[in-house]
Image (cartoon, rainbow, N blue to C red):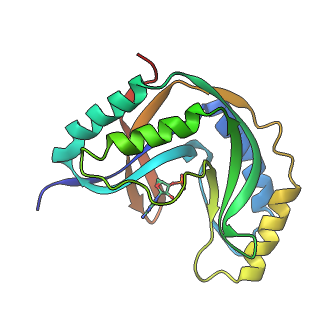
Amino acid sequence: MPESKRLFIAIEIPASVQQNIGVLSAALRKADDYGLSWVKASNIHLTLKFLGETPVSTLEKIEVGMANAAANSSPFEITLSGCGCFPSPARPRVLWLGMQADARLGQLQRGVDEALVDAGFAREKKPFSAHLTLARVPDTCPTTTSQKIYTQLVTLDTRHLGSFTATEITLFQSVLSRFGAQYTPLYRCRLGK
Ligand code: 3AM
């Protein structure tokens, strides 16, 4: 079998902003008497495209696609604000923080998606919904419990979490284990020509 890696492309979040998110996340965790799967602050990132298990022979094409998409963009500001859950407040499965950014964020995500078609990746079918995952709800968790934690999340003030300039996109390898996910940057590409 050819060697493969589990990959995704993301915008990294500065450590200072991750720390702010960590403080909010820790406050929310106190309301979690079930044990949701909380994302470690240092693992929080903005996913642009999940590639999944990918043969290492495809890495070069992915890097070319990323370079093309990044060259067609330019650095832009992202301000964290708001929160939400997928798929709906009636059945929260993923709790997340939102953000504000100009049209370049959506353009960059579409550019990455399009640039990877040549590398053999299908275009995303669902519209992009920019978010930072805070926690995932295990299948076994009662809906009333996840609703309760989501209700706590919406009461928190998310306006102080911070802003940063997105200057690059990163190809990450994700290794899953019972100790949690470990993300390793494999390739970074600066936005702009
Ligand atoms: O940062 P978020 O949570 O948006 O949810 C996973 C995470 O994105 C997502 O890829 C990112 C890094 O793990 N992910 C994991 N498995 C996935 C799948 N099968 C997936 N996205 C789509 N399909």
Question: Going by the picture, which residue comes out furthest to the top?
Answer: 193
- Compared to 79, does 72 lie above or below? above
Q: Is there any visible trace of residue 184 in the rendered image?
A: no
Instruction: Pick the residue in front: 142 or 34.
Output: 142
Q: How many marks?
A: 0
Check the image and report above or below for 34 versus 58. Answer: below
Residue at figure coordinates x 75%, y 61% from the top left: 29
Q: Is residue 49 left or right of residue 106?
A: left
Residue drawn where x is 49% and y is 59% of the image: 180
Residue at 43 percent of width and 46 percent of height = 183
- Residue 92 horizontal side relative to residue 153, left or right: left
Q: On the rendered image, what quadrant is the N terminus found in?
A: bottom left
Quadrant of residue 171 within the rendered picture? top left
In the image, residue 125 sits, relative to residue 80, either above or below, namely below
Q: Residue 72: horizontal and vertical position, in percent?
A: 42, 25
Residue depicted at x 40% and y 40%: 112
Instruction: Let me know if residue 181 appears in the view.
Output: yes
Q: As drawn, is 92 to the left or to the right of 118?
A: right
x%, y% of residue 166?
Answer: 56, 28
Q: Quadrant of residue 158?
A: top right
Residue 138, position in %: x, y?
59, 75
Percent from the top left, x then y, of residue 137?
A: 62, 71
